[in-house]
Image (cartoon, rainbow, N blue to C red):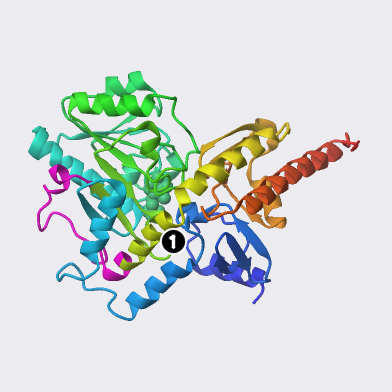
Amino acid sequence: MTTEKFVQLEDQYVANIYHPLDVVIERAEGVWMYDVDGKRYLDCLSAYSAVSQGHCHPRIVNALIEQAQKVTLTSRAFRNDQLGEFARELCELTGYEMTLPMNSGAEAVEAAVKAARKWGYEVKGVPDDQAEIIVCLGNFHGRTTTVISFSSEPAYRRHFGPFTPGFKFVPFGDMDALVDAVTPNTVAFLVEPIQGENGINLPPAGYYKFAETLCRRENILLIADEIQVGLGRTGKMLCSEHDEVRPDIVVLGKALSGGVYPVSAIVADHSILGLLNPGDHGSTFGGNPLAAAVSREAMRVLVDEKLAENAAEQGEYLMQRLRRIESPYIKEVRGKGLLIGLEVTADANGARRFCEELATEGILCKETHSTVVRFAPPLVITREETEWLADTVETIFARIEARDAEAAGHPVVSS
Ligand SMILES: *Cc1c(COP(=O)(O)O)cnc(C)c1O
């Protein structure tokens, strides 16, 4: 089948909730993806950071196959021989006492909300149904009805109400607003250490540590949504480590399985997760042996291949190279590790056309919030590949600038 045919099929039969580039991927390996015509692309999205370990990592795929031939699903009605070891290894990797495994990221966020509320009622003593959770403007925590109840993005909410109450907004990075938002009923502050979907936004220095200190003082749980920034992406195993913050609850997903299977989890200490009892929560697939086996191998790959270290090294190099590009269309390059956002200027006519042009050169990027090109390749990327990426981005910006100048009747004469 041709690319056009695949695109037409999808558009006809699949609910139209995304705006994908019309590249039809057939197979992938490491940082590379191949379309149905055999054209090769460097993946700079990594499935929103889920394939940090690289596409189809042989060790993770092997773990999947081996476990699939033994047992895939028992439900939590019975025990399985993978869950306990998965939990111990995840706790050791992240430095927490317990975990609650789920499947998608949004489900793990929901689990964090429930755990925090329960803690609020049973430990903090908040009156029934009065718990408040503070969230940030511009957040992204997923798409379930409760999670969009605390989104500030109109497009995520329109015609999906009524919404779940109990959430209060503060501007991301604003310390005074955070202090003012606290009431005796506040049970948690839910935050992304770096806002991913909102354009790779970093808070001001000291903000995150300030938030932690405030939470301790006011007896509020700090919940870090590290679904996108966690597990090595920013150059540390947890992004919170950059600020020496230890959240009370960390939400993980995406790279927790290396993109091979949906696996998410929250981690916290016994003082929080120990409050949950049979009947409080559940998931047919959460903690299944296939998920556990895949995730165990995905975590080992992160450690064995020193992927956080590589993210720090290649990320620093890429950021430096992107910042050196001289283009009237680049407003700012920001990020941490291999989570980098290149914001285009108002004159640039949006980020998408840069993504489309990059695709013709074999680089797949996705714009976020229409003005930011995100560079988040798998963490296994080599220096050579990173150099090629930077060179190509430079070429593309020059090409588009020249083309626009020509279209405007002011051709850029190369010297
Ligand atoms: C992707 C993401 C989610 C949602 O994860 P899903 O698996 O798509 O439900 C939540 N929070 C953050 C920060 C994310 O990047």
**Disc 1 secondary structure class:** loop
Residue 225 position, x and y percent, is: 34, 43
Q: Is residue 66 above or below residue 352?
A: below
Residue 275 position, x and y percent, is: 11, 47
Residue holding disc 1:
259
Quarter location, residue 277: bottom left
Give me the residue at 65% from left, 69% from top.
3
Q: Is residue 280 above or below residue 167?
A: below
Residue 172 position, x and y percent, is: 40, 29
Residue 396 position, x and y percent, is: 74, 46
**Left or right placement of residue 13 versus residue 262 in this view:** right
Q: Is mark 1 within 8 Å of ligand 1?
A: no
Picture quarter with the N terminus: bottom right
Picture quarter with the C terminus: top right
Quarter location, residue 177: top left
Q: Is residue 158 visible?
A: no
Give me the residue at 40% from left, 35% from top.
242
Q: In terms of secondary structure, what is the magenta stretch mainly?
A: loop
Quarter location, residue 264: bottom left
Q: Is residue 356 visible?
A: yes
In the image, is residue 279 part of the stretch drawn in magenta?
A: yes
Q: Is residue 282 above or below residue 313?
A: below
Q: What kind of residue is marked 1?
A: Gly
Q: Nearer the viewer, residue 205 or 197?
A: 205
- Give the extent of the magenta segment: 268-292
In the image, is residue 82 part of the stretch drawn in magenta?
A: no
Q: Nearer the viewer, residue 322 or 264?
A: 322
Give me the residue at 56% from left, 67% from top.
28
